[in-house]
Structures are given as structure tokens and as C-alpha cells.
Image (cartoon, rainbow, N blue to C red):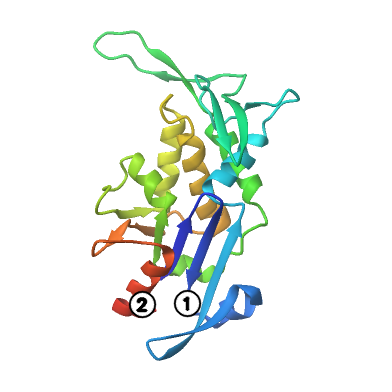
Amino acid sequence: MVALDLGGGSTQITFVPAEEDTLKSTPQEYLTSISLLHKNLNLYTHSYLGLGLMAARKDILLHHRDENGVIHSPCINPIIHTKWEYAGDVYDVNGPTEVKYQEVRGQAGRLNEKRPIADHEQCLRTCIEVIKDQVHSPPELKTRDVIAFSYFFDRATERGLIDPYDGGILTVQEFLQASTQTCNIPNAEQPFACLDLTFISAFLTHGYGLKGTNTIKLYKRIDGYELSWGLGLAFHIINNGI
């Protein structure tokens, strides 16, 4: 089982490698030995500082800041004009200057509507640029069970993809589809929904190298206990083994 945790400033991955190739190809600083339930285990664990959701959001937005300090991001819907504060700095955030529209069929005899949308394709390219060459992705991740916490859970809940209390299971492809759909919906109350979901789906695929068919278990609590990656991993090992 692989435990993924997405915080604001960093993101973490932790698992016990099952393949010898993973141990051979992994940077030594990612590996540590632990003793659990009278077993000595090689633990793969690493925190990517600067690739948490809020830190990555800042970097993605800054890719599209003009000479006056104003951000016009393809990840933001054109109807959005807002201020965002992070780490003591305030950013002037807007949608792109060149507006893209999606034609929505009118209902009950009404005229079709041209709906302003964020540019998901360009947003995805920017997210990949931020992630590129920063993440180690052992091939065995594609064959392992994955459980995810924190912002992975929160953003899936906000989109109605999983139950906010019981959690649920999603494929990576469902995250990708949700990001595309979210970018096509003007939503002034959640101005960063498109960006956040696109970053998450990009991180799963272009960061960790997961396939669209890979499933991710998303939980907030188990047996009433709110989970971090460490507690989630311990629960799984105790109940199911590595």
C-alpha cells in the first residue's frame, strides 16, 4: 500500500517497496529502515517541499504574471477577478485575457449559451511544467494499492466525487475527467477549483506516473480517527500486511 498526503506547502509519499528494482533505483535519502510488529522493513518515504497544493498553486499562477504583477492564468475562469494571499504576499488573480467559450445548448426552447471557460489544456501544461523533473516515480507504484489523504480527499469531496464522511474510491481517470469538467464551469465561489484539480491529476499522472485505471482510496477517518499518512499506513500494515 502506498500512502499519499497532500498538504499546503509539501506533499509526501510513503510505502514499503515490494520490488528489488525499487530499492536499487531509489535515491538512498528516500529510504529508511524501521522495525514494525517485530519485522525489519525498508521504508520509502519522501516529502516534496514546494509541491503542496498552496505552494504549487502559487508557482502555477506566477507562470502567467505580467510585467505589472497582474496574473492572467489559463487555470482561472475569465469571470474571476480576485485577490489571493499566500505566505504573506497578496496576488492579483484573474482569468486569461483571451477568453475561451463553450457553447451550451439551451433548454425548453431557449437560445444556446456561450459559457466562458478556463483553458484546461494550457492549465495542464503549466502544471506539468511546475512538476517536471522534481518527482521520483518508481514503476511499482502502478501495481500497488494507493490511499490518499488531506487535500486529495478535500478536493474530491468538494466536487461531489466521494462521500464527505465515508470517503470513497476513484480512478485517476475520474480525477482527470473532474478537472476538465470543473474548468468548464464558471464558479466565483471556488475560483481555484480548476487549478487545484488539474494540479492533482497532473501530479498523479506526470509526477507519480500512475495510469488512468489506477484506483485511489480516499479517506478522512478510519474507526473515528482522523488520518495522516503515517496513521493510515500503520492501519493498513496492521490489518493487511505491507
Q: Residue furthest bottom?
A: 38
Marks 2/1 in contact by CB < 8 Å: the verdict is yes
Mark 2 element type: helix
Residue at horizontal 57 percent and vertical 56 percent from the top:
207
Q: Where is residue 34 drawn, in percent x and y?
A: 49, 83
* Quadrant placement of the N terminus: bottom left
Residue at position x 38%, y 59% in the image: 215
The image shows residue 98 at horizontal and vertical percentages of 61, 19
Secondary structure type for disc 1: loop
Q: Is residue 166 above or below residue 195?
A: below
Residues at marks 2 and 1, CA–CA distance in whole angstroms? 10 Å
Q: Is residue 51 above or below residue 85?
A: below
Residue 230 appears in which quarter of the rendering? Answer: bottom left
Mark 1 is surrounded, within 10 Å at the Cα level, by few (under 14), some (14 to 19) or many (20 or more) other residues, namely many
Where does label 2 land, which residue? 237
Task: Name the residue carrying label 1.
Answer: 16
Exactly how many numbered labels are in the figure?
2
Residue shown at the point (37%, 87%) measured from the top left: 37
Residue occupying image coordinates x 33% and y 72%: 235
Q: Earlier in the sequence, mark 2 or mark 1?
A: 1
**Residue type at the position of mark 2:** Ile
Closer to the camera in the image, 13 or 184: 13
81 to the left or right of 144: right
